[in-house]
Image: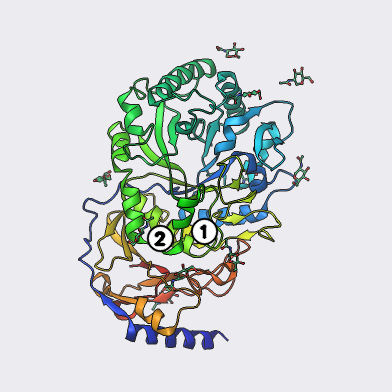
Amino acid sequence: MQSALAVLLCLSTILFVRAAQRVDLPTIPLSPNDASQILDRSLASLSIEFSYLPSFGGNASDPNTLTQELMQRLVERTGVGPDIRPGGITVDSTQFSPNASALELDESSSGGIWKTTYGPAYYESLAVFPNSSKIVIDVNLGNNTVQFARDEIQAAVKYVGWDRIRALELGNEPDHFAGGSRPSTWASSDYTAQFLGWTSVLSRNLSLPKDIFQSGSFAEDPTSQAPMTTVSTIEEGIDTTGVIKIFSQHTYQYSTCDPARDAIATLPNLINHQNITAYLDLWKPQIAAARSAGKEFVVGEYSSVSCSGKQNVTDTFGQALWLADTVLYGASLNISRMYLHQGATLVLQSNQQANSPGFSWYDLWYPVETDRYGAPRASPSFVAYLLITEAVGSSGESQISLIPAPSPQLAVYAIWDQSVLSRIAVLNLGIRNVTASDEEKEATTVSLDLSEYVREGSNVTVKRMTAPGLDSKDSSAVTWAGQSYADGIASGDEVVETLHGGLLTVQGSEGVLVRL
Ligand SMILES: *[C@@H]1O[C@H](CO)[C@@H](O)[C@H](O)[C@H]1NC(C)=O
Ligand SMILES: *[C@@H]1O[C@H](CO)[C@@H](O)[C@H](O)[C@H]1NC(C)=O
Ligand SMILES: *[C@@H]1O[C@H](CO)[C@@H](O)[C@H](O)[C@H]1NC(C)=O
Ligand SMILES: *[C@@H]1O[C@H](CO)[C@@H](O)[C@H](O)[C@H]1NC(C)=O
Ligand SMILES: *[C@@H]1O[C@H](CO)[C@@H](O)[C@H](O)[C@H]1NC(C)=O
Ligand SMILES: *[C@@H]1O[C@H](CO)[C@@H](O)[C@H](O)[C@H]1NC(C)=O
Ligand SMILES: *[C@@H]1O[C@H](CO)[C@@H](O)[C@H](O)[C@H]1NC(C)=O
Ligand SMILES: *[C@@H]1O[C@H](CO)[C@@H](O)[C@H](O)[C@H]1NC(C)=O
Ligand SMILES: *[C@@H]1O[C@H](CO)[C@@H](O)[C@H](O)[C@H]1NC(C)=O
Ligand SMILES: *[C@@H]1O[C@H](CO)[C@@H](O)[C@H](O)[C@H]1NC(C)=O
């Protein structure tokens, strides 16, 4: 059986090698000249909608084993767990009560969450995440009551502990507060003033460590129309009291919040290297501003399509390719960590959105059984976090650069580990759908000559992230190094190829990681 599979693999590889389009790369420097900062091993992190954390984590008597397994797959690759940020729109209507049970939701008739009350048992949900995972504590700013934030931070310090807390964050997307929890005139300077006032009161009242706050978490893309950004708040003096550790903004490239944006949230638009890089390039001034202030810049919440994703788009293998390119490119721009949002449709997100209640179509995994998604399982995009974490590696001394490729849909990233060129990630974003004909498959297959990076006597290996097609929705058919991860555990025989002769072949809608 295994040898038959090997023969098949060989045959298909030969077929595509013959037909593949040869792409010549510019020379990749053997040392990291002008590469990124040292990559944080928690680059690929997670944000989980506050009121759904118990669905993802479970509790002490009933921990979510799928979540536990999936997190271990990441720890195995980098040596640390991803950061976890229980946050999102629901945080701005939360209240901690020492007498409450884990989670008490006040919901509208259509399932919108209007208020979340939580008690000490809420934190049991964090126990399934690795002990090495840092937690971002997001607290209620929306209610405009500093006592709520104070009680929530105090509870987090008590039940999570400083050894696990990455940072404290006030509210979620405060640039969307105008006309809601704040007057319609609510502007950047109002946010900055409130941030300074609250952080000063909270720091004093709770004797907080010096620089512990993550500011921002703005929703809007930082165009000239953005109501508030890292740049505007720094200009207003937000970093003058020394409480800020990290600046955060959110990125959602597409949206189903309204029909006009829903119409362009298609797989061909998403899975496009030019679109992905042009979008993240908008954040360059924000990253630069944070870094000149000596602080980290993170994308504290992100996914491809806001308002909870889109069926047949963000629940496909295409989302894995989008994720891999987005996170590796973000890392090359010196974004320290990116927190992929695990959400649920909240009804109150927009009054003309396309989605109804349920877990989001973009979630990396579905932690519990639901009518919409069926059994708990990893989604077809989970493998992207395996590719990314293996690209980052476990040394804590790797750096990355995008290598310009002559083919527009080919994304090539070089990774130097301890200043030595060590890995190359190649993402072929050419579209190969499940129904593609052999001609279409051939037309999107590329081959790259990597022989000049193959050291004498070294064993260059290749792991492949692949699926029957871009639009594939079956997690058990989506593989990383030949194995699928639907139940969080590697299934099938591992396939690690050896790069003979230095020639690498990559099909359309496929990603590979080459280890030199
Ligand atoms: C990222 O940071 C490194 C040093 O930490 C710097 O050399 C590089 O120019 C920065 N890259 C960008 C795109 O700013
Ligand atoms: C733990 O979670 C299970 C499953 O959701 C639930 O039935 C049980 O009541 C919870 N236990 C506690 C102590 O909250
Ligand atoms: C919690 O319960 C205790 C005693 O049952 C009560 O004194 C206290 O006021 C309650 N606290 C809150 C925040 O409801
Ligand atoms: C975290 O550490 C505690 C105490 O050492 C241990 O009981 C628990 O199993 C660990 N959790 C994980 C997810 O490794
Ligand atoms: C603040 O919380 C209180 C108590 O839950 C609620 O009545 C009030 O409407 C909230 N205000 C805002 C602005 O969210
Ligand atoms: C902090 O605030 C709480 C509640 O508002 C108050 O009871 C307490 O005395 C304050 N502590 C300090 C040290 O300011
Ligand atoms: C995405 O890229 C394609 C091809 O470059 C372009 O036609 C399209 O307008 C882009 N879509 C968006 C929404 O930027
Ligand atoms: C998604 O595809 C399925 C068939 O695979 C179809 O039944 C469903 O209507 C599609 N949904 C949308 C929103 O296009
Ligand atoms: C691939 O499938 C997507 C989604 O169904 C569709 O939008 C796209 O046009 C198809 N592309 C090709 C090249 O067949
Ligand atoms: C190369 O490495 C792979 C994966 O570690 C291993 O399976 C294979 O046997 C090695 N090949 C040689 C020739 O050393």
Q: Is mark 2 within 8 Å of ligand 7?
A: yes
What percent of the width, then of the height, locates residue 312? 54, 63
What percent of the width, then of the height, locates residue 67? 62, 53
Quarter of the image for the C terminus: give it.
bottom left
Quadrant assignment for ligand 3: top right
Element marked by disc 2: helix
Among the 4 quarters of the image, the one containing residue 226: top left
What percent of the width, then of the height, locates residue 293? 30, 31
> Relative to 467, does residue 368 appear above or below in the rendering?
above
> Relative to 459, does residue 360 appear above or below in the rendering?
above
Specify few, some or many for label 2: CA neighbours under 10 Å numbering under 14, 14-19, or 20 or more.
few
Residue 498: image tag: none
Please say which color scheme the image uses.
rainbow
Quarter of the image for the N terminus: give it.
bottom right
Residue occupying the point 35% across, 79% down: 443
Residue that carries the numbered disc 2 in the rendered image: 269
Question: Of 35 and 347, which appears nearest the observer?
Answer: 347
Q: Are marks 1 and 2 in contact (CB under 8 Å)?
A: no
Residue occupying the point 46% across, 51% down: 260
Identified by mark 2, the residue type is Asn
> Relative to 460, does residue 3 appear above or below in the rendering?
below
Looking at the image, can residue 81 be seen? no
Tell me if 126 is positioned left or right of 370 in this view: left
Residue occupying the point 48% across, 87% down: 8
Tell me if 281 is positioned left or right of 65 in this view: left
What percent of the width, then of the height, locates residue 283? 33, 43
Residue 314: image tag: 1
